[in-house]
Amino acid sequence: MTEYSGRNAELDLVLTEAHARYVEANPASRVLHETAARSLPGGNTRTVLFFDPYPLTFVRGAGQFLKDADGHEYLDFLGEYTAGLFGHSHPTIRTALDTALDGGISLGGHNRMEAEFSALVVERFPSIDLVRFTNSGTEANLMALSTARAVTGRNQIMVIDGGYHGGVLYFAGGGSPINVPFDFLLAPYNNTAATLELMTRAGDDLAAVILEPMLGSGGCIPADPDYLRALRQATRDNGSLLIFDEVMTSRLAPGGLQERVDVMPDLTTLGKYIGGGMSFGAFGGRAELMARFDPRRPDAFPHAGTFNNNVLTMTAGCAVLRDIYTPQVAEDFNRRGDALRQRLNAVVEAQGVNLQFTGLGSMMTLHPHRHPVRCPADAKLGAPGLIELFFFDLLEAGIYMARRGMINLSLPHTNSDCDQLVEAVEEFCINRRSLLLDDAPSA
Ligand SMILES: Cc1ncc(COP(=O)(O)O)c(C=O)c1O
C-alpha cells in the first residue's frame, strides 16, 4: 500500500503538471468550452468527448490531420471512434455528397440510392439477407432488440457486462440510469460456462443475446471464437436470437468480424464508418426475420424514421462500399493495423514496461499492465491515470487519440505517420519509465 501510494503520488504530480501545460497551451479551447457551457450541460453534447480540465475544440480536419482552436495540428489516431476510417474530407465521399446535394435532399419519398446502398450492404455481409437503415448505431440496436422481442414473443435480453451498444444501452461500470428499461441479463464476457448457465436459467424467456464480437469501447478485447460458437449453438437450442453488434467491428474484415471468425448471427447491426461520416445505422439479418418489416404484409412491423433513407448518407454509403472500402482495401488495411499493433507491442516489450496494446486489425487499445486482457474487468487493471498521462503526452507529441486509450488506424495514415506513433510510444516508455516498471495497483 505504501509503495502504491508513493507511485500514485508521483503519477498525480506529473498529471497535475500535464494539465497545467495543457491549460497554458490551449486558451482558445478553454474560452470556447466556457461559452458552450452556457447552453450545453458542461459544454458537452456527447459525453465520451469530454475530459478534464476541458476538451479541445477542433476547427478543421483534413486527411489524417486535425487542427484545434489554438492552431495546433494533430495526427488523428482517434479516427472518430472508428467512424472516421477515411480521414477527413475524402475526395470520393466529397464528390458523392456534392452530387447528392445537386439532386436535392429531404425528398420525402423513396430515392434511387437506398436500393443501391442496401444491395451493397447485403452483398457484403454474409448474415444479412435484408437490411433496414436507421440514423445511428444506438437506434439500430434498439430496433434489433425490439425485433427480437417481437418475433420471439419473449422478454429478456442477454448483454455482456461491460459491453456498449449506444447511449441508452450502456453496460460498462454498472450500467447507466438512463438505459432503456428492457429486462437485461448481464453475462460475463468470454466465460462460456457461466454465460451458458445464465442462458439455461433464462430458458424460454430469453429473446436475444447481443454482443460485440470484439468489445470496442470496452478495451478492444476480442471474443474467443469458441465463445461465439457456443453462443451460436445455445441461442439456436433455446430459440433465442443471436445479435452481433458490428457497429465498430464490421471494418475488421470485408464481411465484418463475423466473417473473420466464421460465426453467423441471426441479426447484425452496423453503424459508424459505413455512412462515410454521415449519420448512419442499420440492422439486418435473416430474410424471414427482416421480412416482418415488409409493409406489403398485413402484419408488418412499422419502422419509421424521417432520415432513414436520407440522400446524403445513402449516397456516401454507396461510395464507401462500392468505391473506397472494397474487400481488398479492407483486407490490406487491417493487415497494416495488425502490423502496427505488433510493432507497438514490440516497443513496450523491448522497454520492459507494463503496457500492452490489445485489439484486432485497425482497432487497438492501450492497457497499463501486462496481465492477459480477456474481459472488461481485466481492462480495469492498472492505474487509469497512466492512460490519461499517455493521452496528454501524446497530445504534446502532436498525436490525438481517445482519452481512454483507444487508437484507430485510418486509410490516409502513411507509414511515416505510423512511425511517428511508434516513436511517441517509445518516448513515453523512456520518459515515464519509473511509473511503468512495476505492476500498478488494481482499480
Ligand atoms: C459497438 C457499438 N454499438 C453501438 C454504438 C452506438 O452507435 P451511435 O453512436 O451511432 O449511436 C457504438 C458507438 O460507439 C458502438 O461502439
Image (cartoon, helix red, strand yellow):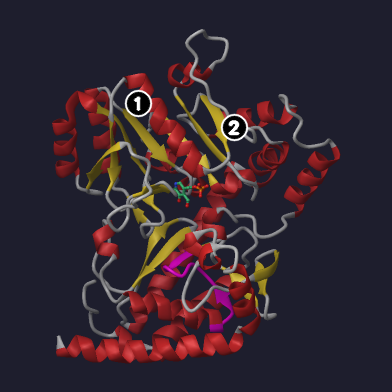
Residue position for label 1: 149
What amino acid is at disc 2?
A: Gly
Residue 402: in magenta span: yes
- Choose top left, top right, bottom left or bottom right for residue 203: top left
Residue 234: numbered disc: none
Q: Is residue 244 left or right of residue 137?
A: left
> Which structural element holds mark 2?
loop
Q: Position of residue 382 (x, y in %)?
A: 27, 74
Above or below: residue 91 compared with residue 309: below
* Quadrant position of the C terminus in the picture: bottom left
Image height of 154 relative to 399, above or below: above
Measuring 19% from the left and 34% from the top, which residue is drawn there?
199
**Which of 45 and 236 lies nearest the eye of the viewer?**
45
Does 107 sit above or below residue 326? above
Q: Position of residue 196 (x, y in %)?
A: 17, 37
**Image mark for residue 305:** 2
Q: Nearer the viewer, residue 9 or 95?
A: 9
Neighbor class of circle 1 (other Cα within 10 Å; few <14, some 14-19, many 20+) is many
Q: CA distance from mark 1 to mark 2?
A: 20 Å
Residue at the farthest front position: 38
Counting labels gives 2
Return the x and y of residue 56 as percentages of the image width and height. Answer: 58, 74
Q: In this orientation, does residue 416 appear? A: no
Specify the quadrant that holds the N terminus.
bottom left
Decide which of 265, 186 is in the foreground and name it: 186
Left or right relative to 287: residue 212: left
Q: Which residues are magenta?
A: 396-407
